């Protein structure tokens, strides 16, 4: 424990276990109503889980996908589904797992604050809305699960150091580190950074009265590294995982424009004004810690935050073909900085109470906004998913989901909705990621090339620069018709209806539709207008798509 209130001090309401429990339950509220959590990538992950569970039972799945178990650092929900799906069914099992993640993140933040400060400081309440950060909204569920586990594991690390159970800590953190690595490597890496920084402070404090630069400043680095060795064994698994054939590049280093955007987007959901203003509130709280004489920063968590900031700056945007590597860390970097704040000794209870009420109000407003947002997304999901009532089991389905080139703040969250066709109808879905070594599933349905996997499901009105997406007219005219029996278009941009030649409407709702492919009717021919304003650019990118496929 660093600083904090005397043990005999009376607990305030925000410092009690009842409040921690209430905060955890409140964090679950936005996910209670939606049948499928409206997270961008989640339906695509759910399709993979369905293939995982039914690969040996339904022979056509093996014709479409390769699924092979491997020891990789990206298996959190994939493993939990195995015992839970037979009990609850796949969709409910996924919902229960995802629903547990925000409460675990909130509890992790509060527990860390309790261990470092002795009592939960009122300022820690401002970190609670980060349970619903942009990476979570994006549907990085294995990552989010691993980070939730890492926060709570770090709190346990601090507690065992505070109570003097260092030998036991070294023993129990060998399996803990392995489990978190299995969930997702980012959680394991973040845990290592947090534990090392905390141990560095502890080792420095043990030598505070010693003379000499080496004893006070250099030796603590060595001892901190030794203390963290129980966290190291997964590094061997990482080497084995990445030593084989793994597709995807690592690049886009020090992209300052992107990094600034990730910080402003930490709470990105639906309403840009609301979300950006909320991030501004958090930075105002941090700034208050620098200027307000009644508030101070913990040395322990301040160093942890500085280490995470350094990692955020040095991380590239793309790691092994996986985008948004640095973006994922931003909310937790900010969260650790927020819980590093605490009132200075002697500050009045009234001042702390005011801060706590402000933090609670901020938390409740953010959760209320997220609840409304998820309810609105759920209504869209319900409307679009009615198309699946008309899709036969085992159908060869190609889907096209409308998108714009504008990177709009409110994402439609429909980009991977076609994955639910696999979940509910065991139908082929062309929205699956296919990166050997990064996931357990890869696409093998060669007849569908170049419309076999992500991002072939994304369609736009024109060719977008720096994107592999196709104009909707090109997709409708060029998808290999012999490979598919049905076409599902989900809120596409406007297109020439002559491109529906050979497509028999089965269901329509607005501009969304489900078509059955009539293989005896020839497809419509493309015109220069169907290629958008940059036909030469499109032809070049289409050639590259075919080569990479």
Image: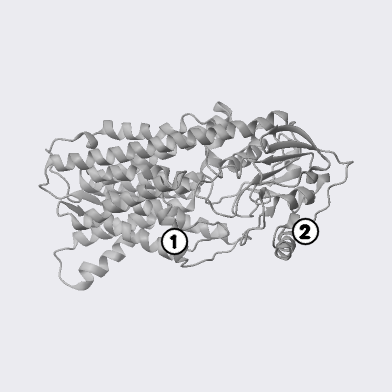
- Render colour scheme: one colour
Mark nearer the N terminus (2 vs 1): 1
Tell whether 419 sits left or right of 286. right
Whole-number angstrom distance, CA of label 2 to CA of label 1: 38 Å
Residue displayed at 15% across by 44% down: 5
Tell whether 503 sits left or right of 242. right
In the rendered structure, are the residues bearing label 2 and label 1 in contact, judged by CB atoms less than 8 Å apart?
no
Question: Quadrant of the rendered structure where residue 131 is?
Answer: top left
Q: Which residue is mark 1?
A: 259
Q: Which residue is mark 2?
A: 528
Tell whether 51 sits left or right of 13. right
Residue displayed at 48% across by 36% down: 374
Crowding near the residue tagged with mark 2, few <14, some 14–19, many ≥20 C-alpha atoms within 10 Å? few
Tell whether 527 sits left or right of 177. right
In the rendered image, residue 451, in percent from the top left (x then y), is placed at: 73, 50
- Of helix, strand and loop, which one carries label 2? helix
Relative to 147, residue 387 above or below: above
Depth check: give the residue in front, 167 or 149: 149
Residue 447 visible here: yes
């Amino acid at each position: 424990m660093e600083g904090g209130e005397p043990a005999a001090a009376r607990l305030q309401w925000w410092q009690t276990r009842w409040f921690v429990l209430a905060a955890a339950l409140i964090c679950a509220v936005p996910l209670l109503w939606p049948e499928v959590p409206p997270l961008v990538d989640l339906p695509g992950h759910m399709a993979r889980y369905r293939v995982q569970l039914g690969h040996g039972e339904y022979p056509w799945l093996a014709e479409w996908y390769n699924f092979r178990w491997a020891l990789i650092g990206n298996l959190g929900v994939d493993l939990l589904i195995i015992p839970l799906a037979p009990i609850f069914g796949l969709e409910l099992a996924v919902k229960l797992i995802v629903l547990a993640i925000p409460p675990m993140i909130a509890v992790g933040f509060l527990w860390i604050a309790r261990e470092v400060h002795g009592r939960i400081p009122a300022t820690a309440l401002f970190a609670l809305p980060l349970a619903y950060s942009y990476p979570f909204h994006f549907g990085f569920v294995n990552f989010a699960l691993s980070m939730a586990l890492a926060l709570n594991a770090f709190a346990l690390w601090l507690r065992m150091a505070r109570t003097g159970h260092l030998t036991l800590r070294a023993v129990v953190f060998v399996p803990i580190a392995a489990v978190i690595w299995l969930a997702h490597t980012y959680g394991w890496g973040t845990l290592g950074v947090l534990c090392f920084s905390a141990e560095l402070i502890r080792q420095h404090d043990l030598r505070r009265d010693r003379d000499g630069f080496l004893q006070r400043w250099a030796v603590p680095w060595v001892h901190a590294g030794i203390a963290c060795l129980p966290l190291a064994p997964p590094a061997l698994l990482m080497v084995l995982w990445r030593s084989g054939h793994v597709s995807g590049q690592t690049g886009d280093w020090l992209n300052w424009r992107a990094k600034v955007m990730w910080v402003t987007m930490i709470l990105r959901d639906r309403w840009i004004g609301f979300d950006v203003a909320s991030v501004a509130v958090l930075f105002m709280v941090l700034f208050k810690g620098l200027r307000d004489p009644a508030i101070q920063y913990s040395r322990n968590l301040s160093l942890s935050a500085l280490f995470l900031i350094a990692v955020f700056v040095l991380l590239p945007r793309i790691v092994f073909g996986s985008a948004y590597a640095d973006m994922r860390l931003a909310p937790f970097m900010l969260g650790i900085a927020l819980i590093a704040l605490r009132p200075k000794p002697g500050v009045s209870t009234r001042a702390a109470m005011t801060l706590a009420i402000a933090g609670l109000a901020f938390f409740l407003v953010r959760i209320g906004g997220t609840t409304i947002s998820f309810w609105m997304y759920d209504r869209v999901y319900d409307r679009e998913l009615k198309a699946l009532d008309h899709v036969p089991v085992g159908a060869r389905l190609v889907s096209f989901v409308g998108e714009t080139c504008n990177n709009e703040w409110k994402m439609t969250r429909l980009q991977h909705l076609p994955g639910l066709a696999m979940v509910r109808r065991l139908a082929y879905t062309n929205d699956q990621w296919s990166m050997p070594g990064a996931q357990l599933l890869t696409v093998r349905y060669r007849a569908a090339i170049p419309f076999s996997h992500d991002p072939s499901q994304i369609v736009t009105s024109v060719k977008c620069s720096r994107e592999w997406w196709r104009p909707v007219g090109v997709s409708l005219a060029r998808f290999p018709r012999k490979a598919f029996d049905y076409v599902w278009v989900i809120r596409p941009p406007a297109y020439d209806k002559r491109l529906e030649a050979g497509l028999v409407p089965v269901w329509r709702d607005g501009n969304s539709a489900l078509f059955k492919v009539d293989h005896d009717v020839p497809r419509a021919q493309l015109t220069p207008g169907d290629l958008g304003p940059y036909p030469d650019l499109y032809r070049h990118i289409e050639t590259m798509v075919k080569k990479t496929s």
